[in-house]
Amino acid sequence: MASLASLGRLSSRAGQVGGRRLAQSTVARRAALAAQNFTMPALSPTMTEGNIATWRVKEGDKFQAGDVLLEIETDKATMDVEAQEEGVVMKILQGDGAKAVKVGARIAVLAEEGDDVSTLEIPAEDQTGAKDSAKEQLSQGSSTYGGGSAPPPNDSVPDQPTHSAAKANGGGKAPKQTYPLLPSVAHLVKEKGLDEAALAEMTPTGPNGRLLKGDVLAYLGAINQKTPVSISEMFERLSHLDLSNIKIVKSTPPPAKEETKAAAAAETPAPRVQQVQVSLPVSLEAAFRAHRKVYKNLAVNLPLATFIERAADIANEGLPASARKPSADDLFNDLLGLPQAGHSATRGRYFPMISSPTATVAQPAFSGSRQQTDIIDILSGTATKARKPVAQPVAEFDVTDADVPLFSLNVPKTEEKRARVFLERIKVVLENEPARLLL
């Protein structure tokens, strides 16, 4: 008896499953054989109506994805409407030259490729689609065959929302949508066959109260009802920088030992550069003879300081480089193995200090003055013959070994060799080459 009862239950259950499958196949076949309305698409967010310039296809023509179905004129431009998939033109309801066709109004009836057009019924037009502004928003971006069709019949619409889903998604009346629907939201609403009443029950979680795709899915029960709200709260929370966990650390004074070390380092004077004095006796007898000769022949009184300045200028040429710490360029050139010839000889800036016990370097005095002739008198021819100056006898200098002046320099210890070379050169010029001082 038990086996007979279980066998009966199994046969009953198989009959129920078979019945459900048969009903589903019937609904699917009916949806597949149903024709679809092709409505006036919205080619811009502000478009409310348009004119049909011309149809590129005729009734009964087949078309492929990407084929141009018709041309639509607006107040701004003329645009082509392309097909998204294959199909057949069953009926054209708004012909060439139709004016002021509202967005969402039915303009043709299309069928799928392979359908027998003679066996299909023309679906009823959705009157609310051409009149309500909400339907105009839903049709935005539907410039192709797939996106511009009217909602399918009720028996082919899946995932219709339940009353419990609507309550869980918001419970109260949602704020009115002031922005056009996003393309993804409009496509989903069209696909699910939702009307304006369903949109009014949805709770938008987007910026400025805008409806998002997640809000529609939550209304349909496809996702958790709390997911859109939680995501919106997370974005709101992460959009601001959280400074609540920042703690201000109080600055601690440095240890006393470090302060004393720093103070001691600041008070420590910089090491003094050791100075040395380099001296060399230089006879001025040859310079005096050259001085007397110039005055006797040219009547030109050259100060003795001029001879010494000229001799110092000659002696400063090409002095050996002073000992110094290598620079960064020197170290780099040394690493590369480059020669350091650039610092072998440089020009000096030395001028000697002169000391003499009998002031033999003083300028000898001359009496009388030489009359200068004005250049204007020479050019005008009125100049008188210049009187030859009477040369006074030049003071004789009795230069002995004890009266030889002492030339000296105070220089850093590192330039001692360089300063000695300078004094030796000036000695040679003043004693042996006085003629160079007159060039």
Image (cartoon, rainbow, N blue to C red):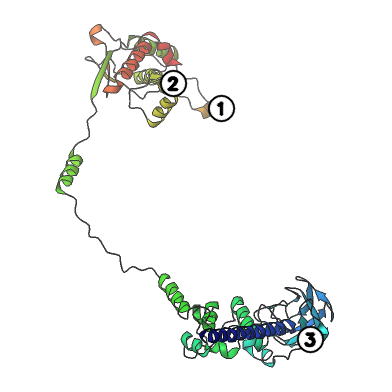
Residue 174 appearing in the image: no
Q: Residues within 10 Å of mark 3 (few under 14, many from 20)?
A: few
Q: Are marks 2 and 1 in contact (CB under 8 Å)?
A: no
Q: Would you name the residue on which mark 1 appears?
A: 379
Towards the viewer: 239 or 13: 13
Q: Which residue is identified by label 2?
A: 341
In this picture, residue 351 sits left or right of residue 256: right
**What whole-number distance in Å separates the C-alpha atoms at marks 3 and 1?**
127 Å
Which sits in the foreground, 229 or 165? 165
Residue 144 is left or right of residue 291, and the answer is right
State the CA–CA distance, disc 2 to disc 1.
Answer: 56 Å
Please, what secondary structure does the residue beneath circle 3 have? loop
Q: Which residue occupies the extreme front position in the image?
A: 1
How far apart marks 2 and 3 lie (CA) works out to 103 Å
Q: Which of marks 2 and 1 is in front?
A: 2
Q: Marks 3 and 1: which is nearer the front?
A: 3
* Res 120 label: 3
Q: Label 1 sits on what residue type?
A: Leu
